Amino acid sequence: MSPNIFTPKRFPVTGSLILIVLILLAVSPLYAPPYSVILLTAIFMYIVLTVSWAIFSGPTGYISLAPAAFFGVGIYTSAILGKALPLLVVVGMGGLASFCLALLIGALTLRLKGIYFAIFTFGLVELIKNLLLWYEINITGTRGRFVIVVDNKTIYYVMFIILVILLLTAYFIRRSKFGLALQSIGENEDAAAHIGINVTLVKVSAFAISALFMGATGAIIATRWTYIDPIIAFNPLFSFTPVLMAIVGGMGQLYGPILGAAMLAYLEEVLITKFPYHYMLLFGAVLVVAVLYLPNGLVGLIQKWRKGDWGQHANT
Amino acid sequence: MIATILDAVLLGLLLGGLYALIAVGLSLQYGVARVLNIAHGEFIMLGALTTWTLYTVFAINPLVCLAICGPIAFILGFVIHRILFKPLLASSASPRVFEGNSMLASFGLLFIIQNIALIVWGPEIRGYTYLAVPVNLAGALFGANRLVTLGFAIIIGLAFYLFIARTRTGKAIRAAAQNPTTAGLMGVNINNVLALCFGFGAAMAGIAGMLISISYPVHAAMGLEYTVIAIIVVVLGGLGSIPGSFIGGFILGLVGTIVTYFEPGLTLAAYYAIFILLLLVRPTGIMGKS
Amino acid sequence: MRILEGEGVTQYFGGLAAVSHVDFNVNQGEVVGLIGPNGAGKTTLFNLISGAFVPKSGTIKFKAEPITGLKPHQICRKGLARTFQSVKIFANMPVFDNVILGSFFGMSNSIASADAARVATELLEFVGLSAVAATPAKDLTLANQKRLEVARALATRPELLLLDELMAGLNPTEVAQAMELVARIRDMGISIFMIEHVMKAIMSVCNRIIVLHHGEKIAEGTPQEIATSRTVVEVYLGE
């Protein structure tokens, strides 16, 4: 019996449930209080960052510490182009700019061992921040820019659209040849190369796709922040939180990063005003604990619990 | 300031000594314990801010703080390795998995330490002056504080080199760096060696922090930039080569001094440019094994 | 016709010549054995042929076309597949997915999903793993993991298959089964180049044998010639 990518969805119920949730979310700005709309926008943002991070780093095991860099590129695109072009185009350009940057980085570092990739992406946020600071101080003379103002409902809908497109993309990648190839690269890159997979091309493509969504998200969220400068835009926190959320949620299933992001984003919103340093301390500790004791995240926990309950459940 | 090439070289050495110290610490942790400790800069920051407190609050001479910061950082590093990285090593399915997991764990550590520092010291930038007297050397003026930094970096580097090359523990460390499994079979207490190296790396970071604090301002978020620099130096010297990191530190220090002279804001960009060149041409670095 | 040909192939690791000016060839339809003491450079030679490493000097031709310097995935698509000494299966993926990846990516033309699935099912049948198609590869026995590697390699529709110590770690029954598998692959028309330590297997199934020692070719000939060659016997007994 052929498993995995050819078996039809076993639970059409899940599909309908998801559809209902999506519809509810789509109409909520009409009924919900403005604070909820803003909160949901923030949660959507984190889900996008986390799921797009997981598209590449999940299956391949190449840990990217660059989300903040792509996010920041999107933010800056918005600041620069926001007044000149329509909103959706700006968001698209934010995505495109990050996509191109990722192609460059990928072509440079993904031919080498994973450690070089991780190292390079780690320093990237600091580098771009410094470069932009220098540029703004010495060349343009500005320090910080104002971003166009957009009303919260529009921001919500744009973020929602990005989220839906991303989830569809992530879903279809998982079920495709491309997704299978990504997984095999994570399992054994040498073997994958020897059965005809152009591993560098596959890696760079996935990396660039994930960057695209991070950039688009940055572009739209910048309109909520309204004032940005290199230090605000390129904040290592936005590399840390998606990674944390993906690991806590678990990357074995698509819902893992979504769960992790939703939970932790909500927790952050609750804690950030009262305990700004304490909650980050907590998050740091959560990451350490998760890496030590929960390497497969909540998804792993749920799968184990199911296995325990139902006895001989195949561990896929 | 840079009237002659000699000035540039001397200034470069001053900065380079600092970089070399920081990089050797990180290289120890990666080369032997196989942990890419991206929280390395946070130990530097702790050393710096602790020294600031000890000097401004308790009037303890910063050079004496060396004797305090070093050992405390060592103990901290040793303990952290025992309670965090050792269990992680045991639970990781392969070296590659451990490399990824330990990096993630150190990422978490980064935020833990930085936020503790923010809670204790707040986000403000701190500084103090100590030994800021000019010293005349070969016709140019250098701050005594920077000369002290260079002096210590060299002394520590040499002391460490002798330790590694001559003592029994040093030999054990070298063996563990080459091949942990075989070393273990040969009777080396591998767990102790790994934790020891991690501790030494942390100690070097703490001491470097103290040395930085006598010449530059310090703040709770200062660590990240030093970690990035340390990593670039380690790659430049060759991943896994401790002498390579030492040499790489001086090279990058020289480059940094020259770039700062022409365009101060672009030093990190210059380092990254070197990094990119390295990745394109010779990723294994100066002394790395291909 | 020579399906595989190597001339003066040389590779250094550190200062040492792992493979030193080795000439070799495999004719279409042949089963050629590659033997030698441990450290002789056999797997290194395979790595050079499959594109995992690039030789310092020398040329390698596949179907009369030079392949030196090509990437592994390009060489695979031309029709050269291999298995590995340390079994490199995709451990957490089901057996079926392991094989179908070969069909999806290993052939020179792309293939429809349904056809790929059919090929994978047939190959699992061929190697005897149909019963465990849904099992994660890491849960298989060593012998079965080796069969999986073979099936995956065959899914790329190779004309030449490099087998690296297929029989290592197998008990006598499993060795006999592996030998039989090799014979069936040969009967499919696929040329085989195999590294092996199990002498019985090599002697019975190979048309020709090449012997390496310290990176150099020290003998080449039929199983009969090799078995009676004094050079070879000394090398093996001396080790």
Image (tube, rainbow, N blue to C red):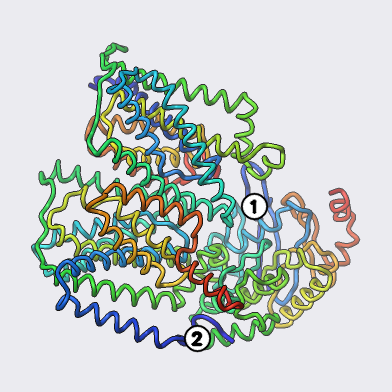
Give, as a three-letter code, the residue at label 2: Thr
Query: Mark 1 — on which chain does it sit?
Result: C
The reply to whether label 2 and label 1 mark residues of one chain is no
Q: Secondary structure at mark 2?
A: loop
* Spot occupied by residue A304 in the image (x, y as percentages of width and height): 53, 70
User: Quick one: label 2, few (<14), some, or many (20+) residues within 10 Å?
Assistant: few
Q: Quadrant of residue A154?
A: bottom left
Residue drawn at 66 percent across, 65 percent down: C87
User: Quick one: label 1, few (<14), some, or many (20+) residues within 10 Å?
Assistant: many
Q: Quadrant of the N terminus of chain B?
A: top left
Residue C10 marker: 1
Residue drawn at 29 percent across, 30 percent down: B258
Residue drawn at 19 percent across, 69 percent down: A36
Between B262 and A221, the one nearer to me in the picture: A221
Q: Secondary structure at mark 1?
A: strand
Give, as a three-letter code, the residue at label 1: Thr
Q: Quadrant of residue A313?
A: bottom right
Picture mark count = 2
Q: Quadrant of the C terminus of chain B?
A: top right
Between B92 and C119, the one nearer to me in the picture: B92
* Spot occupied by residue B269 in the image (x, y as percentages of width and height): 29, 42
Inter-mark Cα distance, 2 to 1: 49 Å
Res. C63 visible in picture: no
Q: Quadrant of residue B154?
A: top left
Looking at the picture, does residue C234 appear above or below residue A183? above
* Spot occupied by residue A9 in the image (x, y as percentages of width and height): 45, 86
* Spot occupied by residue C209 in the image (x, y as percentages of width and height): 79, 65
Residue where numbered disc 2 is placed: A7
Relative placement, left or right, of A3 versus A214 is: right
Residue drawn at 41 percent across, 38 percent down: B233
Res. A229 visible in picture: yes
